[in-house]
Amino acid sequence: MRQVSLFETLGLQKDTGEPPDVYDFFAGAGGFSCGARQAGCRVVWACDNDPVALRTHASNHPETTHALTELPLKRSQWPFPTDGRRFHAHFSPPCQRFSQANMYVSSKREKAEGSDELRAATRLVRWSLRVALTCGATTWSFEQVPSKRIIALVERAKRQHPGRVEYVVVDFVDLGLPQSRKRLIAGSPHLIAKLERNVDPLRRASIASAIPAPRGTHVRNGCYSKSCRQYALSKRKGRKRSGWGEHLRSIHEPSFTVLANRGLNWITRTATGIKKKRPRLSTHEYAALQSFPQDYKWPEGANLGMKQVGNSVPPLVASLLMRAATIYV
């Protein structure tokens, strides 16, 4: 009797030397696409509703077909192949409405608008999970903030599709990213299992390991001194920002999270206190903390570059996922 291999038991095949093609939804500036390409995959299609971010993607991935479009797409508009070829579908729907800092607003009008936006963002998450599980993809992945709402939606998909959905909440710093960045990653179970095996606090990298010429001894997070709720309500309550000597991380530690709407500053500690010069990190320095290669092309303008970097999936994480998809397809 022929012995059944582990690959066959799991419904997988050994690597044939042909990595799956990648379809990148909510692609932004191309973080996931960059990591997929580093893993040897071909990114054949990418879409986003931000024309500036999509131009950045196109300048770095000229071989990819780009679609400037609003999501969700009708089934008749899905770009997936129908000839049986293997492919991977990735989804990174907008996360701003699920983050804790954005859950608090100060007026009835803002609450109503925020509720509408939250419902719209939730519909995109549901659509992403539904498409991922019904489009015929060989493997799939999904990235979001680990809010209670997101976890509940992924758990529901897991119950509805037994054996096809798994997820992990992980701080990317334990995967080797030189910044704290806690996220939920869902996808094909063997991809998530492989990602979990790479989680190790000993992999933690420092700011200095990512940025060859740091311009200070520390970086500072430009936040208020209180909680996220108090941060969101700070203007209404008249709260003040923290002093420049607070919220510092040494360059020999991982950085704070790189955000799309709030920058980091270089700080130099001296024997007598804080050096007055406080330059903001450049786009390429943000990108290095997000694990982008040094030659990645970014638009001019510090705020625009920070926004695109902060909204990106770290290529390091995408590469780890897609290497698993390449080995087992």
Image (cartoon, grey):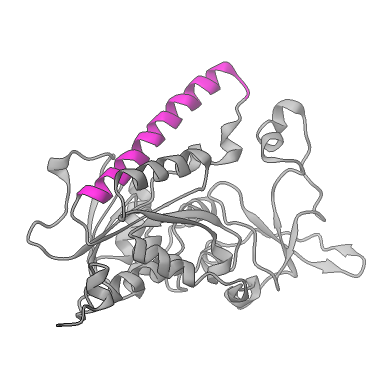
For residue 313, which quarter of the picture? bottom left
On screen, residue 104 versus residue 290, left or right, reads: right
* Magenta region includes residue 249: no
> Magenta segment, which residues?
106-134
* Magenta region includes residue 119: yes
Residue extending furthest front? 1
Can the viewer see residue 329? Answer: no
On screen, residue 222 versus residue 25, left or right, reads: right
Question: Going 57% across and 16% down the picture, which residue do you hit?
Answer: 108
Across and down, in percent, residue 79 comes to 16, 51
Quarter of the picture holding the N terminus: bottom left
Question: Going 73% across and 63% down the picture, which residue do you hit?
Answer: 249
Question: Going 36% across and 65% down the picture, which residue do you hit?
Answer: 191
Quarter of the picture holding the C terminus: bottom left
Question: Going 19% across and 50% down the picture, which residue do you hit?
Answer: 135
For residue 87, which quarter of the picture? bottom left
Magenta segment's dominant SS is: helix
On screen, residue 297 versus residue 23, left or right, reads: right
Above/below status of 49 relative to 195: above
Q: Nearer the viewer, residue 221 or 162?
A: 162
